[in-house]
Amino acid sequence: MNIAPSTATLGATVTDVRLNTLSDRDWQTIEDAFHQYAVLVFARANLTESEHIDFSRRFGPLERTLSQRADRQEISLLSNVAQDGKIAKPDDNLGLFLKGNRYWHTDSSFKKVGAKVSLLRAVEVPDSGGDTEWADMRAGWDALDPDTQRRLEGLVAVHSYAYSQGKVGGIALLNKREQDALPPVRQPVVRVHPATGRKNLYVGRHASHIVGMPRDEGRALLERLTQEACQAPRIFRHHWEAGDIVAWDNRCVLHRGHPWPFDQPRVMKRTTVAGDGDNPWTISEAGGQAP
Ligand code: OGA
Ligand code: MN
């Protein structure tokens, strides 16, 4: 196996490994690299859907997807090709839903327990554009001056899907039951990564405001922290080829997608590893129903 770190504070490209027949020793190497680099690109891994799910489970039990469009609960479909085969328009529900991903975020922070890991696989890529970019919130935290760090410790933000997607539009893609299952939740602004012990900033587009602070003030602070943290050398960007799969650690990175020519299909499939703890969205081995 070859692991090539990027020049940024996060991100590495892993090659010369077969993820569908992974030994426990190679898994350990991957997990260690994951904790160090937070984003791993498995270039041209060419996994089938089942292999994608099996590899994802190495990180832990999966989270049930939100979107009704997926045909299995382990897979989130991020595609601008609608069920009728037509390509989404920038301003229809599907186009707007996908547009939300263009703003820095961390997956499922609007759920009671945010996601642990996301593994995104490129099925069909456009001729140009459609890159994904990640930002290192550990390095973002480290870059803050001690006074600001002290001010942030103990702050709690309200994360809300109705807020974040409401700003962009396209929320109608979720049915009422799904929307009702996503009340606003509280998340700490500073968190500690359970495996590495490193502190990092927990911000991004789903964070609406800060508890106990005037809404505008909290919102402005969250936006400023996000913008300042998401700068070089803390950002890492990937241009997709079909068959690539990228795993990122939602417990310490933000990510965003970049636009592509809207008349071209882009089909991505994602598994989400459920955050640890009392998580109602975890798919249990018994196959119980999440909210
Ligand atoms: C995601 C996501 C961005 C992209 O899969 O969670 O935000 O580039 N994707 O598709
Ligand atoms: Mn995302």
Image: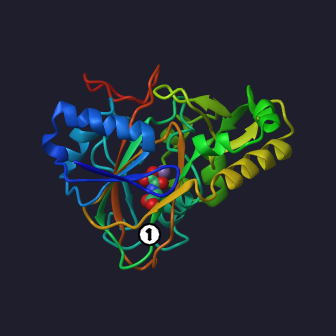
> Closer to the camera, 103 or 74?
103
Q: Residue placed at 78% from the left, 35% from the top?
A: 146
Residue under pointer 1: 130
Location of the C terminus by quadrant is: top left
**Label 1, residues with CA under 10 Å away: few <14, some 14-19, many ≥20:** some
> Closer to the camera, 215 or 55?
55
Q: Position of residue 281 (x, y in %)?
A: 42, 30
Tell me if I can see residue 66 in this picture.
Answer: no
> Closer to the camera, 227 or 136?
136
Q: Is mark 1 within 8 Å of ligand 1?
A: yes
> Closer to the camera, 15 or 82?
15
Q: Is residue 289 left or right of residue 177?
A: left
Q: Secondary structure at mark 1?
A: loop
Q: In the image, is residue 287 above or below residue 204?
A: above
The answer to which quarter of the image holds residue 27 is top left
Q: Label 1 amino acid?
A: Gly
